[in-house]
Image: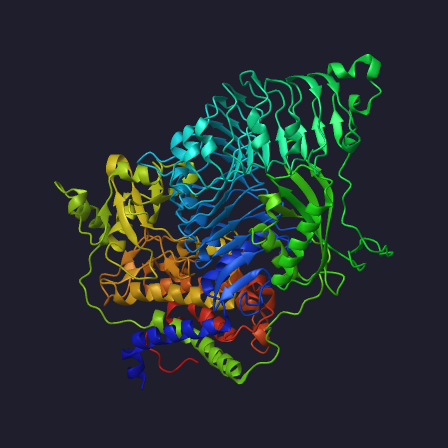
């Protein structure tokens, strides 16, 4: 029986390993990659929702704000789901969420830091919404890799730097909102070698207002293939002329170029844009004749104030704009009489023609628009005004005209009216007395409303006292909430204000139905509906955005589908998992301890490695290597951006490790030794030679190396989750629960088994430790750093006599004393690593040797062997650690002082 176990040990170990890995995933409904990504976000954020609990499964137990499709996370919507908002940074490990389609973190004002480059790896992302946060730094170029992106809204943050030209690659983009940041530079267009905004043929919205963009609008940006309906470039530092190509974009509806430094003529073909409702060109340096806009009969809001147009009579085309609500032509050099037919336009609400050269007698007439509220003709040359009783409700301002000479200054139109706030607020039908902090709803229920600010960037109207608009908005909001079955009692609008920048702002309150407060699901739905433009306001309000305040009082909420009763299937699954985890130590010991007999002649490697590499006349191109490429130094410089500090991902006594990118786009890790580094030529050559001939998924892969110009450079596969040490210390943001630690241990064991069992000749690593164990995107362990490794060239002898090297704490004491290195030296280091996995402590921690501490504290009569105080808290002590005792027994057997007492390859009986 024993011989059968020995001969079949490796195959059995691999089968058991696969069973263990497959079955242990049953304990989590969520894909392991997604768990890693969410855990990393959670580690970097404060104030996450309470359901984001390490002991609950994100998909199976319905983490708030998370939507899953089977086991994969497809949506994260955390719009003010915390009373004071999320706080922290966005982890680069978000790339683990490879099936993510929507990311909405809007209105979390304490989310800061830069957007990680890794966000560009979310290839399935269709909606990226970060409105009203506080992100800083440049928008990463990698955002141009999100080829499925439809909705990109980064407005109201503190992003700086240029607009990435790579955004031009987003061919599916519909909505692009980068407004209200600190963006600088010009508007990027394609040039044959780089993409640009002109390539966004399907994009309907360019919202770039309130930035610091400069330069001219490239004529190439606008062309007949564009389908833009909104082009908002207001409040920037743009210069040059308005390109005539603007007349080619015939679907345009809103154009805001105001508050820039544009000069030159307004292109005459702008009149081709017959769908435009809002045209704002004010506060620039435009010259030439005022354009004839007769053909733009759909205009509602026109403002060309404060430019340097040529002097002209009042344009006759003013009176042809039958849809006009607002005409603002302050300081535009117009002169002559104001025709009374202007005031007869049926929808006209406001006329501002101040600071011009208007003269003659002003007569608003008897047929003026019933909606007319304001006529402002300050600082002109009006000599007389024909008063009519019908026009007494119009606010007329003639201050600074001859008609307001000293003898008649008592006339109301000769006195500047006081600025007044809009009086509208949603009326309440009753006035109940509410407890403190509660507010009465429209239906007189006291509650805690969800509150935020609605900002409309280009409303078509100017009569802010017209309650019809607000009633229409309230009704549309309620209709939208009901259509999505959101439990809303009523909405309230207040604090309505039109800023000098022509943005209309107001406070929105949304009241809960049948309760005094919302639960988190309802808040999430309301926030997402308003942030991703699912809600469509009445057309008169135009484009908008919403920023929410933190919601302070959530209702208690049961988790839908939470697992209160275990089904028979679940019970069976748990039983199988338990059995599988109990087999994990057997997997490990079988992999590590079972060996084949080998017979190879002994050679002293210290005398042959250098000679075999650099014998007279040899070159690096003829080295005895397989599968490794010799990289030119210049290529390595380019892949690392010339060894940029921004690319540094690690450092040590040997030098630095840089992130690099191969020409095919694949990421690599570039390890560059410093001059005089402790890692000498021999260690470098050893690592290249060994890694060039060993290939296994649990060993880090070597792509190549460089020995040019005195450099010692190794190019490895890029392993994104860093070292096991970083995860155990909390630096990586990855939480390792019990199941993941078992997986890491199995991966390390499998890599070592390959080195000891299948490599020819066998290889002794000699420096197994948590810093030399890397974790990939799936948390698969990869053994790395073979600089100290030795091939076992004489299996019959069973050891190598060599200088002692390794890391204190992991170092085999028997090897240290005898200088005889064998496979059991790696077994000892592996045992230390296993103890480090469960304790989270370094082998030597503040003078305490963890092996000795565990050995002295163990009490096999107690649960968990009485080692509770030694366990890493992040392991999840509230969950059952299946197989823990077997794991500890195996670990301690690996760290026996004498090698003969450690697990051997010949097992006289089953140790379990």
- Residue 280 sits in quarter: top right
Above/below status of 520 relative to 864: above
Q: Position of residue 446 (x, y in %)?
A: 80, 58
Q: Nearer the viewer, residue 313 or 22?
A: 313
- Residue 822 in view in this figure: yes
Q: Position of residue 887 (x, y in %)?
A: 47, 72
Quarter of the picture holding the C terminus:
bottom left
The colour scheme used to paint the residues is rainbow
- Residue 132 in view in this figure: no
Above/below status of 676 relative to 16: above
Q: Residue furthest front?
A: 366
Q: Residue furthest right?
A: 433
Quarter of the picture holding the N terminus:
bottom left
Q: Position of residue 169 (x, y in %)?
A: 38, 44
Q: Nearer the viewer, residue 755 or 485?
A: 485
For residue 895, side relative to residue 867 (left or right): left
Q: Position of residue 348 (x, y in %)?
A: 65, 35
Q: Residue furthest bottom?
A: 1
């Amino acid at each position: 029986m024993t011989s059968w176990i020995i001969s079949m040990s490796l195959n059995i170990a691999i089968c058991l390993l696969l069973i263990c890995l497959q079955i242990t995933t049953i304990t989590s409904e969520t894909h392991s990659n997604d768990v890693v990504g969410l855990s990393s976000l959670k580690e970097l954020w404060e104030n996450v929702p309470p359901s984001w609990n390490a002991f609950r499964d994100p998909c199976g137990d319905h983490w708030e704000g998370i939507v899953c499709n089977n086991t994969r996370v497809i949506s994260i919507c955390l719009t003010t789901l915390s009373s004071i908002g999320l706080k922290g940074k966005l982890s680069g490990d978000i790339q683990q969420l490879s099936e993510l389609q929507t990311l909405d973190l809007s209105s979390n004002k304490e989310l800061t830091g830069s957007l990680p480059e890794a966000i560009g790896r979310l290839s399935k992302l269709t909606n990226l919404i970060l409105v009203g946060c506080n992100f800083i730094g440049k928008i990463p170029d990698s955002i141009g890799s999100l080829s499925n992106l439809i909705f990109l809204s980064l407005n109201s943050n503190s992003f700086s730097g240029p607009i990435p030209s790579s955004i031009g690659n987003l061919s599916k983009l519909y909505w692009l909102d980068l407004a209200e940041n600190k963006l600088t530079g010009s508007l990027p267009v394609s040039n044959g070698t780089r993409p640009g905004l002109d390539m966004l043929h399907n994009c309907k919205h360019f919202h770039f207002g309130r930035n610091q963009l400069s330069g001219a609008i490239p004529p190439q940006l606008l062309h007949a293939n564009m389908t833009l309906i909104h082009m908002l470039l207001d409040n920037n530092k743009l210069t040059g002329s308005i390109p005539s190509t603007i007349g080619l974009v015939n679907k345009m509806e809103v154009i805001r170029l105001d508050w820039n430094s544009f000069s030159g003529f307004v292109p005459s073909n702008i009149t081709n844009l017959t769908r435009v409702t809002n045209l704002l060109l004010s506060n620039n340096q435009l010259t030439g004749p005022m354009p004839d806009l007769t053909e733009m009969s759909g205009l509602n809001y026109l403002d060309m104030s404060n430019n340097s147009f040529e002097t002209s009579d009042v344009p006759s085309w003013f009176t042809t704009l039958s849809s006009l609500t607002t005409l603002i032509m302050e300081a535009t050099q117009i002169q002559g009489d104001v025709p009374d037919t202007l005031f007869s336009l049926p929808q006209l609400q406001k006329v501002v023609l101040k600071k011009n050269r208007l003269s003659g007698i002003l007569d608003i007439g008897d047929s003026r628009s019933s909606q007319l509220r304001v006529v402002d003709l300050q600082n002109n040359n009006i000599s007389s005004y024909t008063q009519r009783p019908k026009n007494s409700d119009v606010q007329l301002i003639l201050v600074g005209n001859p008609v307001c000479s000293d003898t008649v200054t008592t006339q109301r139109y000769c006195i500047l009216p006081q600025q007044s706030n809009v009086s509208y607020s949603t009326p309440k039908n009753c006035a109940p007395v509410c407890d403190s902090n509660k507010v009465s709803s429209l239906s007189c229920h006291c509650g805690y409303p969800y509150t935020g600010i609605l900002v409309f960037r280009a409303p078509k109207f100017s009569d802010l006292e017209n309650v019809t608009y607000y009633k229409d908005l309230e009704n549309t909001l309620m209709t939208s909430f009901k259509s999505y079955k959101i439990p809303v009692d009523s909405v309230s609008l207040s604090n309505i204000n039109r800023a000098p920048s022509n943005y209309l702002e107001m406070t929105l309150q949304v009241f809960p139905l049948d309760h005094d407060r919302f639960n988190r699901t309802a808040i999430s739905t309301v926030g997402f509906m308003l942030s991703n433009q699912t809600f469509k306001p009445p057309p008169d309000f135009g484009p908008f955005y919403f920023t929410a305040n933190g919601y302070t009082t959530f209702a208690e909420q049961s988790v839908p589908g939470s697992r209160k009763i275990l089904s028979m299937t679940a019970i069976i699954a748990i039983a199988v998992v338990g059995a599988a985890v109990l087999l994990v130590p057997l997997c490990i010991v079988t992999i590590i301890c079972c060996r084949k007999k080998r017979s190879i002649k002994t050679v002293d490697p210290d005398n042959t490695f250098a000679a075999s590499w650099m014998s007279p006349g040899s070159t690096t191109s003829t080295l005895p290597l397989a599968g490794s490429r010799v990289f030119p130094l210049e290529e390595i410089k380019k892949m690392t951006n010339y060894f940029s500090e921004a690319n540094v991902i690690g450092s040590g006594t040997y030098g630095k490790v840089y992130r690099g990118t191969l020409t095919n786009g694949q990421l690599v890790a570039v390890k560059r030794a410093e001059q005089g580094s402790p890692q000498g030529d021999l260690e470098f050559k050893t690592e290249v030679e060994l890694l060039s001939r060993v290939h296994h998924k649990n060993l880090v892969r070597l792509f190549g190396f460089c020995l040019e110009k005195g450099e010692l450079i190794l190019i490895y596969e890029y392993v994104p989750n860093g070292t096991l040490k970083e995860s155990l210390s909390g630096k990586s943001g990855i939480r390792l629960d019990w199941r993941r630690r078992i997986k890491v241990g199995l991966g390390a064991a499998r890599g070592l088994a390959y080195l000891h069992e299948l490599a020819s000749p066998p290889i002794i690593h000699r420096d197994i430790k948590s810093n030399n164990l890397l974790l990939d995107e799936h948390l698969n362990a990869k053994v790395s750093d073979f600089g100290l490794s030795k091939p076992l060239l004489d299996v019959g002898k069973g050891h190598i006599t060599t200088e002692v090297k390794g890391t204190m704490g992991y170092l085999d004491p028997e090897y240290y004393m005898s200088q005889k290195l064998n496979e059991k030296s790696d077994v000892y280091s592996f045992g230390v690593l296993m103890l480090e996995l469960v304790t989270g402590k370094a082998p030597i921690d503040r003078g305490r040797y963890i092996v000795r501490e565990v050995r002295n504290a163990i009490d096999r009569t107690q649960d968990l062997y009485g080692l509770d105080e030694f366990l890493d808290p992040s392991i999840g002590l509230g969950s059952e650690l299946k197989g823990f005792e077997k794991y500890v027994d195996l670990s301690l057997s690996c760290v026996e002082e004498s090698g003969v007492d450690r697990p051997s390859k010949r097992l006289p009986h089953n140790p379990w």
